[in-house]
Image (tube, rainbow, N blue to C red):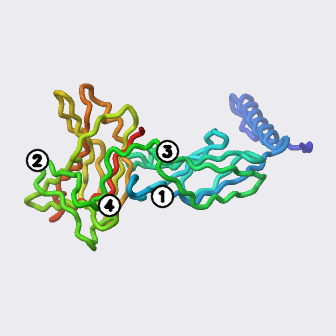
Amino acid sequence: MRKQRFEIRVFLLNIPGTRMVKNLCLLFLGIVFLASCEKFKGDQEVPAYLSIDSIYIYTDYAIQGSASQNICDSWVYVDGQLIGAFQNPSKFPVLQKGTHKVTIMPGIKKNGISSTRATYDFYAPISYNVKFGMDSVTRLKTLKTTYASNTNFLWKEDFEGTSIKLDTTNRSTVPVKVTPEGSSFTIEGLHSAIMITDTVNNFAEAQSHDSFVIPYSPVYLELNYNINTVLTVGVILTGPSAFIQTPVVNLNVTNNKSKKIYIELTPALNSTTGIDHFRVYFGAFMDASLTKGIIVLDNIKVVTTK
């Protein structure tokens, strides 16, 4: 660094302790000055950049169901090392030169909460060999993924068949129906499930027709929904001498828009001993401010690993 002459003057009143204050001020200014000089010593590394527009999923519908998704983030690894999680679309620096393996894991908001972002390990990672150069931008644009090969679909219901595997409970005051073709309430395809409450019949509750063995691996519920009243989603845990209904998340109204959510069931499934099976349930009391409560569900999937 080129030597330069600086004159630093400190003006202080002639009061007790002035000399100590003066010395501290000079010491602080000297540290700041030396730190600023040190910052520019040697070569300053110039990063390369990656940009990602979005990630979508494709599926084998007969095996994996709908391709609806809510992938909001990209978790980016270079040569197996995480460099960060980035909200799509994104552009971010990478301090690498030459060709390296880049792996992108699709990211979600776990339980629909922004502060619980995570990779969704049921979607396959996306990999590229990328050549990095200083101040260059590699545009990966729109990426595609699919379900990981070890994904096990415990339950998959799109309400398009002649029968559905979602039953009303004994407590429900309204039935589960299927939207007719052409209905404005249908989320995807020809049909969705719908429950409508009113001021007299104001409680809707439905559960999966089948019960599932609790696996020794993570379990997620995927769901498309459109609701005008708060909907509770949870699990019913059963065992030889146990029956426990456990709420997992409350979904807020969607203002006449359909949403996709990924709900982690694992903690609830592991919360109690002496149980070995579970069902998924959906329940809602109609909001007192409404004259009609509407709950529309579609593309239900319960996934774990094989």
Q: Compared with residue 34, is residue 301 higher up or lower down, i.e. above or below? A: below
Find numbered disc 2 in the image and state the secondary structure of the residue it sits on. loop
The image shows residue 158 at horizontal and vertical percentages of 31, 58
For marks 1 and 2, the one nearer the N-term is 1
The image shows residue 73 at horizontal and vertical percentages of 52, 52
Question: Pointer 2: residues within 10 angstroms few (<14), some, or many (20+)?
Answer: few
Could you tell me how far apart the alpha carbons at marks 1 and 2 are, in whole angstroms?
38 Å
Could you tell me how far apart the alpha carbons at marks 2 and 4 are, in whole angstroms?
27 Å
Find numbered disc 1 in the image and state the secondary structure of the residue it sits on. loop
Report the side of 240 relative to 4 (left or right). left
- Locate residue 27: give its quadrant: top right
Determine if residue 117 is in view. Answer: no
Could you tell me how far apart the alpha carbons at marks 4 and 3 are, in whole angstroms?
24 Å
The image shows residue 234 at horizontal and vertical percentages of 26, 43
Amino acid type, residue under disc 4 in the picture:
Thr
Amino acid type, residue under disc 3 in the picture:
Thr
For marks 3 and 2, the one nearer the N-term is 3
Find numbered disc 4 in the image and state the secondary structure of the residue it sits on. loop
Could you tell me how far apart the alpha carbons at marks 3 and 2 are, in whole angstroms?
38 Å
Report the side of 253 relative to 49 (left or right). left
* Residue depicted at 20% across the width and 52% down the height: 284
For marks 1 and 3, the one nearer the N-term is 1
For marks 4 and 3, the one nearer the N-term is 3
